[in-house]
């Protein structure tokens, strides 16, 4: 099975056999498009028997994926659909399909590993936090701008700051002596403070045995700033895609 987590700027992928993730990779599609990026990243890979996809990049991206995989591999993608209930988790959204497929997959994967209440954090283009109670009922979540988005917003909306070089956000110091480091420190601490506050409030409501799992491209940058101690799982979404693909009987 090949698993794809297709976001607004990048594609994370892995091959899976008998429940074990084997090859892994990531490429950015927002500059060259999916077809060119995929052709370079997957050159020489054998066609998968099953291709399971969590896509939040829109219907146009689904068409691009289907076109490329059909020509290159003669494989039809199986897109993860968000339902009211699946894999032991009940979705809190009144319109279940409006919850992102990546969030749904991450929630399912995290719940698969525990029967305790939990909070699932995904630090990507946006930062999302979702809470699931001990019965597997999703309690809802929140969405905030990710590090790069906050950084771009400051650069765009404040004339005194202006353009900022690159997209890297690496500083962990509290106070800075120049504008660039000040912006980086500000967005990092905003993200870390948000996460710690939500975890504290969720633990007060759902119990001190609340488990916290974090994933996403910026998770490792944010982790050192957190007072809470989440379990980091870089493959959380892809693991959820595999679980949901089997439940949907993809490839049969």
Image (tube, rainbow, N blue to C red):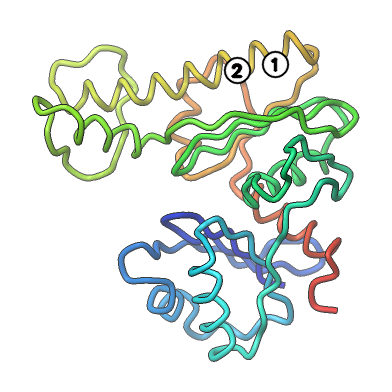
Q: Describe residue 111's horizontal placement relative to residue 181 as left or right.
A: right
| Residue assigned mark 1 | 202
Q: Nearer the viewer, residue 202 or 43?
A: 202
**Element on which disc 1 rests:** helix
Q: Position of residue 178 (x, y in %)?
A: 13, 21
> In the image, what residue occupies the spot 69% across and 61% down?
21
**Label 1, residues with CA under 10 Å away: few <14, some 14-19, many ≥20:** many
Q: Position of residue 7 (x, y in %)?
A: 50, 55
Number of the label disc, if any, that sits on residue 198: 2
Q: Residue furthest top?
A: 204
Q: Position of residue 51 (x, y in %)?
A: 68, 74
**Element on which disc 2 rests:** helix
Against 78, is 90 above or below?
A: above
CB contact under 8 Å: marks 1 and 2: yes
> In the image, what residue occupies the spot 49% across and 76% down?
64
Measured in 3D between alpha carbons, the distance from the residue under mark 1 to the one under mark 2, in whole angstroms, is 6 Å
Q: Describe residue 106's horizontal placement relative to residue 34 as left or right.
A: right
> In the image, what residue occupies the spot 51% across and 86% down?
44
Q: Quadrant of residue 177?
A: top left
Against 48, is 12 above or below?
A: above
Image quadrant in which the C terminus is located: bottom right
């Amino acid at each position: 099975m090949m698993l794809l987590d297709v976001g607004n700027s990048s594609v994370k992928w892995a091959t899976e056999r008998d429940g074990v993730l084997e090859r892994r990779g990531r490429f950015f599609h927002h500059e060259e498009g999916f077809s060119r990026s995929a052709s370079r990243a997957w050159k020489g890979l054998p066609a998968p028997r099953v291709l399971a996809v969590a896509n939040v990049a829109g219907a146009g991206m689904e068409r691009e994926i289907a076109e490329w995989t059909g020509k290159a591999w003669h494989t039809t993608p199986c897109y993860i659909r968000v339902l009211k209930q699946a894999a032991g988790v009940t979705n809190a959204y009144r319109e279940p399909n409006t919850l992102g497929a990546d969030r749904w997959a991450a929630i399912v994967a995290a719940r698969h590993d525990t029967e305790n209440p939990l909070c699932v954090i995904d630090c990507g283009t946006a930062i999302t936090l979702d809470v699931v109670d001990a019965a597997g009922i999703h309690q809802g979540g929140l969405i905030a701008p990710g590090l790069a988005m906050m950084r771009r917003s400051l650069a765009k909306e404040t004339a005194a700051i202006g353009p900022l070089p690159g997209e890297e956000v690496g500083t962990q110091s509290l106070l800075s002596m120049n504008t660039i480091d000040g912006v980086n420190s500000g967005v990092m601490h905003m993200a870390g403070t948000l996460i710690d506050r939500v975890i504290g409030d969720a633990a007060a409501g759902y119990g001190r045995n609340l488990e916290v799992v974090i994933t996403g491209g910026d998770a490792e940058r944010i982790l050192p700033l957190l007072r809470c101690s989440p379990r980091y799982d870089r493959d959380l979404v892809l693991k959820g895609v595999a679980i949901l693909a089997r439940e949907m009987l993809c490839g049969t």
